[in-house]
Amino acid sequence: MKKIIINGDKKLKGRVSISGSKNESLAILCAALLSTDRVVLKNVPNIKDISVMKNLIENIGSKITSSDNIIIAPQIINHIIKSNNVGLIRNSILLLGPLIAKRKKAIIPVPGGCNIGSRPINLHLEGLKKLGVDIKVSNGLVSAQTKELRGAKIKLGFPSVGATESIMITATVAEGQTIIYNAARESEIQGLARFLNQMGADIKGMGTDTLVINGKKELSGTEYSVSPDRIETITYMILGSFPGNEIRVENTNKEDVCEVMQTLRDMCVSIENERTDIIVRGDKDLKSANIIAKPFPNFPTDAQALITPLLCSAKGESSITDNVFPERFTHIKELRKMGAHIILKGNKATIFGQYKLKGAKVICHDLRGGMALILAGLVAKGKTIIENKHYIDRGYENYIEKLQSLGTKINLFNHKL
Ligand code: UD1
C-alpha cells in the first residue's frame, strides 16, 4: 500500500479548482434509479466512493457509461444487494428507496462508512416505515417490502442528512403528499432536490427544515451538473489560511461555506470573494477560535478535523465541540505524534496554540481526519509519512496533483522508508 510523504513548512501559493460534491453525487446516483429513461450526470468527482457506488448500481442491473460525464441507463433487475462493497460506503442505504419503489422489495446489507463513531440507520428505516414499507433487520441484512408507497408526515428526531435523502428520494414516487419536518438543510440535500425536480418530482421547501413532496407516478430522465464540493472548498480555504499561504479556491459556491468563512475571518484570515472564486490569505497572526460543529448552516462536522491543525498554529487556547459525531476525533492522537498539544474530553477538544508541528509517522483513520494529517504535514517542520491513504482517496479528487500545483512537496511512495 502506498504511503504519502510530505516535506513540510513551505509557503504555498496558487489556485485550485473545486471538484463536484462527493455527497451530492452519491445521493444523486441512487436517485437516478427512479428514472424511466437515461440520466446524464456532469461534474461527478472521480473518487473511490463513487466507483464503489457505480459498482453497486451495475450489480443491480443498470448500465453505466463513464467518460467526462456519467450516463446511467437505470434498470433494477436484482432486488438483493450482496456486494461486500456496501460495507464501504454509508450511502448505499439510499439504494433501499429506489429498489422498493421499482421492485416492491429489497434486501441490502446494513451499510458501513467512515470510522467516525456509531452510525445507526434507525431514522432512515423509521421514515421508510411511515411511507408504507415493512422492514426487518437481522443478521446484518435489511429486508424490506411494500404493497404501496404512500405519503406521510415524518418528523426527524435529528436533521440527519442521510435520512432526509432516503425519505425524500422514496417519497417522490409515493402516492400522495409527504412532509418531512426537522429535515437536514445541507447543500447536498438542496442539490438532490433540484435533481429530483428536474426528473419531474414535486419537492418544495428546499433549504428550509420542512420539505413538502407531492408524489408522482414516475420520474423521467434528465441532464444534471453536480454542485461544487463544499468540504473540498473548506479544505483548501483552511490550507490558504496558514500564515504566508495564499490560495485562490476556484469554481465553488461561497453560500455553502459561510460559517467556516466567518470563523476564518474571526481568526484574522483575509478572505475575498470574486464571483465563483474565494481568495484566502494567511497574512496575519492567527487568533484562537471556539467552534461547535452542528447541522447546516452551522459549522460542519466534516470541517472540524480539518481546522484542527490551523488552531494548533493560532495564538492561545481554542476548542472544538462536535455535536453531530461526538466520537469523530481519531486524528487527535496522530496530531499529538506531530507535537500538537490537545486535550480531548468527550466530544470537546481543547487545542493549545503555537506549538510548532513537526513531521512524524502517522496513520489515517477516516477521510477528513486523514486530510487533516496532510494539512498538518504541510505546515510541519521536516518529513511526515502518512499511512492508510485509502481513506483520503475515498473523497478527494486528484488531491496529490492539486496540492503539488500549490508548491507542496507531497509524493507517494511504495517502498518501506
Ligand atoms: C452525511 C455525510 C457525512 C457528514 C454527515 C453530517 C454522506 C455520504 N456523508 O453522513 O460526510 O459528516 O452527513 O453532515 O453524505 N443518525 C442516527 N440515526 C440515523 C441517521 C443518523 O442516529 O438513522 C445520527 C448519526 O449517528 C449522527 C447524526 O445523526 O450522529 C448525523 O448523521 P447524518 O446527518 O445522517 O450523517 P450521514 O448522512 O451518515
Image: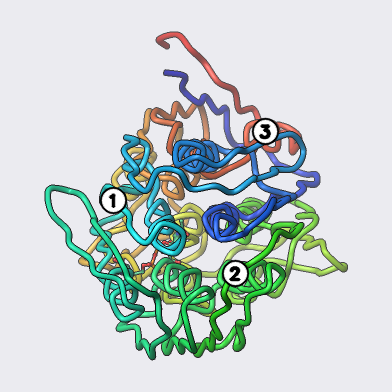
Q: Residue at x 46, y 22 (%)?
A: 3
Mark-to-mark CA distance, 2 and 3: 50 Å
* Circle nearer the viewer, 2 or 3: 2
Residue 380 visible in this rendered orientation of the protein: no
**Is disc 2 in contact with disc 3, using a CB cutoff of under 8 Å?**
no
Q: In this view, does 183 lie to the left or right of 79?
A: right
* Label of residue 408 in the image: 3
Q: Above or below — where is 255 with respect to 331?
A: below
In terms of image quarters, where does ligand 1 lie?
bottom left
Q: In this view, does 140 lie to the left or right of 23?
A: left
Q: Which residue is drawn at 40% across and 81% down?
A: 150
Mark-to-mark CA distance, 2 and 1: 22 Å
Q: Above or below — where is 24 with respect to 275?
A: above
**Which callout, 2 or 3, points at the residue further toward the start of the chain?**
2
**Which callout, 1 or 3, points at the residue further toward the start of the chain?**
1
Q: In which quarter of the image is the C terminus?
A: top left
Residue carrying label 2? 218
Query: Considering depth in this image, is 371 or 336 the residue closer to the camera?
Result: 371
Residue carrying label 1? 107
Q: Quadrant of the N terminus?
A: top left
Residue at the extreme top of the image, as rendered: 415
**Which callout, 2 or 1, points at the residue further toward the start of the chain?**
1
> Which three-letter amino acid code belongs to the residue tagged 2?
Glu
- Mark 2, other Cα within 10 Å: few <14 / some 14–19 / many ≥20: some
Residue 352 horizontal/vertical position (percent): 38, 61
Residue at the extreme right of the image, as rendered: 275
Residue 306 horizontal/vertical position (percent): 49, 54
Secondary structure at numbered mark 2: loop
> Which three-letter amino acid code belongs to the residue tagged 1?
Ile
Query: Considering depth in this image, is 169 or 231 the residue closer to the camera?
Result: 169
Residue 10 visible in this rendered orientation of the protein: yes
